[in-house]
């Protein structure tokens, strides 16, 4: 098996895919989180400001989803196919909600009628909440495992099987983390009465997150089989849950000091460390089988050919600096408080 810097190609591609989806979670996290507060703002002006805070960024942030999905399909096509078979309903709902969310952003301010704007406000709020929730539900299902049999065939239910108690808890935890992230981001982009309102809402959001995070973590440790095995084998990696805990604890401390930019960084680090925990716990498994571990989808039995992975890794080396430069330019260009004008949503 070919290697680069002593790491085999499937492992490298596992890291690349993980990095892309982590970037998506961090950047789209505050987008979805900001939208999940939308109906908590009473005035039309406040809602317009909140939408325009993410206006120049939301569609660029979705590039991470497109690239991540493409990288998953190209690097691990077996995992891609099996995952869609098991999670067909949530993924179809996810795509539908993405379309509705984009439509709401574009159409809301196209007309001035009150009923028109209220309708799209509800669509925008609901789509953001459900997208964030579904992302957590999918992650919860991956941690629990799937009923996979020989040849990676999925034998579980279709319509409501993905809504297990643990998946629902993971969904609420993800939603609460995104809402916290979104409120912090909006505090950086707003001022005046809306800023004061967000300060109050952020406190509620952090209580929601800490409560749901604690419950889900406790359930994971007690009921999810083998969740601590990897850490017992390699104690050095205990640093990951420690860093995740410190990042979580640092967010309310920084918020209380009104250091919102630093709080945004640490809430982003919280997402990153939690996803790293998941990746470390699963490796080298991508989709665990609850029927028999030998039926699990791994990075080795799901990977493309060595030549394909080598070519794609070369493309990553070339493309990654370009993507990073584009994002730096984008966020610097649209830095600062939101100012509405004739071109605003």
Image (tube, rainbow, N blue to C red):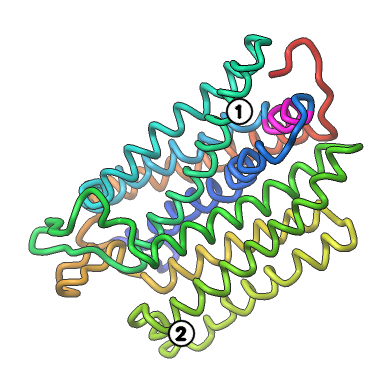
Q: Could you tell me which residue is drawn at 47 percent across and 43 percent down?
A: 131
Q: In the visual, does 267 lie left or right of 173?
A: right
The quarter of the image holding the N terminus is bottom left
> Is 303 placed above or below 343 here?
below
Q: State the image coordinates of residue 31 (x, y, percent, origin top left).
A: 62, 40
What's the distance in space between the residues labelled 2 and 1, CA to CA?
A: 45 Å
Q: Could you tell me which residue is drawn at 28 percent across and 43 percent down?
A: 89
- On the question of residue 307 being in view, the answer is no
Q: In the visual, does 322 lie left or right of 9?
A: right
Q: State the image coordinates of residue 29 (x, y, percent, origin top left).
A: 59, 47
Please check the rendered image and state whether residue 209 is part of the magenta-colored stretch, yes or no.
Answer: no
Near-viewer residue (53 or 114): 114
* Other residues around mark 1 within 10 Å, as few (<14) / some (14–19) / many (≥20): many
Disc on res. 231: 2
Q: State the image coordinates of residue 340 (x, y, percent, origin top left).
A: 81, 20
> Which element is circle 2 on?
helix
The earlier-in-sequence mark between 2 and 1 is 1
- Magenta span covers which residues? 46-54
Task: Report the residue marked by disc 1.
Answer: 121
> Is 201 placed above or below 65 here?
below
Q: For the view shown, which residue lies furthest in the left direction?
A: 150
């Amino acid at each position: 098996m070919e290697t680069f810097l002593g790491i085999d190609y499937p492992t490298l591609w596992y890291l690349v895919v993980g990095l892309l989806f982590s970037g998506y979670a961090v950047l789209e996290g505050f987008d979805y989180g900001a939208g999940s507060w939308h109906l908590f703002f009473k005035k039309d002006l406040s809602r317009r400001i909140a939408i325009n805070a993410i206006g120049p960024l939301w569609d660029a942030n979705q590039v991470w989803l497109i690239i991540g999905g493409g990288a998953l399909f190209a690097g691990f096509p077996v995992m891609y196919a099996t995952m869609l078979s098991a999670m067909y309903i949530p993924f179809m709902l996810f795509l539908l909600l993405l379309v509705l969310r984009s439509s709401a952003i574009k159409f809301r301010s196209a007309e001035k009628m009150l009923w028109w704007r209220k309708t799209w406000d509800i669509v925008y709020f609901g789509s953001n909440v459900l997208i964030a929730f579904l992302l957590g539900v999918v992650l919860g299902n991956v941690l629990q495992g799937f009923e996979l049999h020989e040849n990676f065939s999925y034998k579980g239910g279709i319509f409501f099987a993905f809504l297990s108690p643990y998946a629902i808890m993971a969904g609420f935890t993800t939603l609460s983390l995104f809402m916290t992230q979104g409120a912090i981001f909006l505090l950086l982009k707003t001022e005046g009465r809306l800023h004061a309102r967000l300060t109050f809402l952020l406190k509620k959001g952090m209580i929601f997150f800490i409560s749901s995070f604690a419950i889900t973590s406790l359930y994971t440790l007690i009921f999810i089989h083998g969740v601590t095995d990897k850490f017992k084998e390699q104690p050095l990696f205990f640093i990951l849950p420690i860093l995740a805990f410190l990042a979580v604890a640092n967010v309310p401390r920084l918020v209380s000091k009104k250091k919102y930019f630093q709080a945004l960084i640490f809430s982003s680090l919280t997402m990153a460390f939690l996803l790293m925990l998941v990746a470390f716990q699963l490796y080298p498994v991508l989709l665990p089988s609850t029927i028999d571990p030998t039926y699990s989808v791994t990075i080795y039995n799901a990977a493309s050919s060595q030549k394909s992975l080598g070519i794609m890794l070369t493309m990553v080396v070339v493309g990654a600096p370009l993507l990073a430069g584009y994002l730096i330019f984008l966020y610097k260009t649209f830095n600062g408080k939101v100012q509405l004008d004739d071109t605003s949503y």
